[in-house]
Image (tube, rainbow, N blue to C red):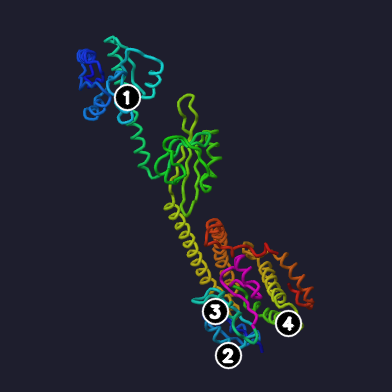
Amino acid sequence: METILLVDDDPAIRELFAIYLEMGGFRPLTVAGGKECLDLLGQENPDLIILDMMMEPMDGWDTLRAVLDARLSRHPPILVLTGKPPVTDEILRYGGMIWDYIVKPVDVKQIVSSLAAIITRDHELQEAMTAAYSSGKDRSAVQEYARLLRLVTVARNLEARRRERPWTDTIQVNALKERLTALHTRLGFSDRLLESA
Amino acid sequence: MSGATIFIVEDELIEAEDIRQTLEKLGYHVSGICRSGESALRTVTKTRPDLILMDIHLAGTMDGIDTAEQIHTLYTIPVIFLTAHADEASLERAKVTEPYGYVLKPFDERELYSSIEMALYKHRMEEQAREDTRTIRVLANAIPDAVMLLDADQQVIALNDAMSRRLNDSYPKMQREPAILFDHEGMFTSLESQVSSVLKSGIPVRFEEKRNNAWFEVSLHLVNGHEGQKKRVLVQYHDITDHKMFENQLKKEGITQIEQNMEQFQILNDQIRNPLQAIMGYVSLDCVHYRERIMDQIAVIDTLVDRLDRGWVESEKVRRFLLRHYRNRPDDPTDETSCRNPLEDA
């Protein structure tokens, strides 16, 4: 059973997601802030983190950076769930560190049902990266590939949801996609990784 | 009758006495008579007459022209030469002392009178002009702005103390004679084209200039002289450093205020969306009967919050524009290059 960690300062949201996550066959863990999240990561090793942005005193971006900088045996994939639509700067800056950016309110059931696919994709990416490292591939190229893959995925997801909120910011993915494809060929990764990007 | 005091320098005593009587008859007051230039200089220093009648031939080593020359350099007392013979050489020498008149002996009473009156009048006018110049200079130096008058050849015609200081030691003789304005550490690079533009169009120009942490507003105005006189340009440097600093502070604080407002905006939207999310989630769980109606209401509120978001996104664009406009100046240390779109590298 996969463990999902939700970081959100609103107890109603924590409780709600716990219910849906359980229904979806996951083991839910919830914490109220970034500090608690980091503390918990010392003991638990969640398969995915759902992160709220608007939190005090440590906001979602601070928490995101801290989680990525933390010494963990494996960094779980991160999904942002927030009440504030992203702006271009935020997408460009953080899009490469997360797998999705969702604006509340959403159909929780639908989100929960998408988690398994994210976990699988992240696993595949991590495996490909580990293999590339051990075969002596350029570390920075591999990391850039991972960043671009996530950024393109986030941009595509945002684009898909713009049907409801056409005014929200997004970024042009074509140039990014080209760089991603070029790196993909250079690193010789499996085409499965690019499927949904 | 002006009642002016007149001093007579004449070596012939009878002649001198004759002049005195004529003058007194004409209503003047004779303050003294001297026979030599040397004693004239001493006496004039003490008595300061309104006018001096000077014979060219005098007793002693100095002649009338030498004496007039000395007086001219020391005082602004008008001198009229009296002489029996007007040779070319004497006339040329006399010119240098800028005499107010030249009366030939034997003089005619009326001629003497008109010469004296003309000299006194001319002198009064000159005094007035000198006084005006002094007043203008006092006024020009009283203002803290650096001001100068340039002609079409970039010659400095006049300037005030503030401008002399600004130009430093480069123009020692500036206040006496026109000097070509040369580019002092690039100080006037922007000025040259502006001066010719003002001369051509006659339309005043105003621009801002930054030099060594100080801001100046430079104004150029066309000054039309008399007919036939060359056109000139008045250049004024007004220090606006304090104003600029205040303006920059205001801009900075303005942006800070916008940032604070936007943060509040985001928090507010988050606070509305969290309950919406909770209601939506719980209703979906077990409120089968009213689910659809509740969901419709959630959609209405969500649309409202969306509109707020839309405003927020627009404000973010404004904020970014302001940041680019006010902070991304090449000489500004708060330059936010991180705002640059990394996609441009792609």
- Determine the chain carrying the residue at label 2: A
Can you identify the residue that label 4 sits on? A133
The residues bearing labels 4 and 1 have C-alpha atoms spaced at a distance of: 105 Å
**Separation of residues labelled 1 and 2 (CA atoms):** 111 Å
- Label 2 is placed on what type of residue? Gln
- Mark 2 residue element: loop
Which stretch is magenta? A75-104
Position of residue B168 in the picture relative to residue B320 (left or right): left
Q: Nearer the viewer, residue B214 or B179?
A: B179
Please provide percent x and percent y for residue A134.
74, 84
Q: Would you call the spot at circle 3 few (<14 residues within 10 Å), some (14-19), or many (20 or more)?
A: many
Residue for badge 3: A8
In the displayed structure, would residue B273 be above or below residue B81? below
Labels 3 & 4 near each other (Cβ < 8 A): no
* Dot 4 crowding, Cα within 10 Å, few <14, some 14–19, many 20+: few
Residue A30, above or below B102: below
The chain containing the residue under callout 4 comes to A
Q: Earlier in the sequence, mark 2 or mark 4?
A: 2
Which residue is at 52% across, 70% downward?
B272
Let me know if residue A84 appears in the view. Answer: yes
For the residue pair B60 and B299, the one nearer the viewer reads as: B60
Amino acid, disc 1: Ala
Q: Are marks 3 and 4 on the same chain?
A: yes
Say which label, 3 or 4, has the lower sequence index.
3
On the image, the x and y values in percent for residue B73 come to 33, 30
How far, Cα to Cα, is label 2 from label 4? 27 Å
Q: Which mark is residue B188?
A: none
Q: Residue at x 35, y 42 (%)?
A: B142
Q: Chain of mark 1?
A: B
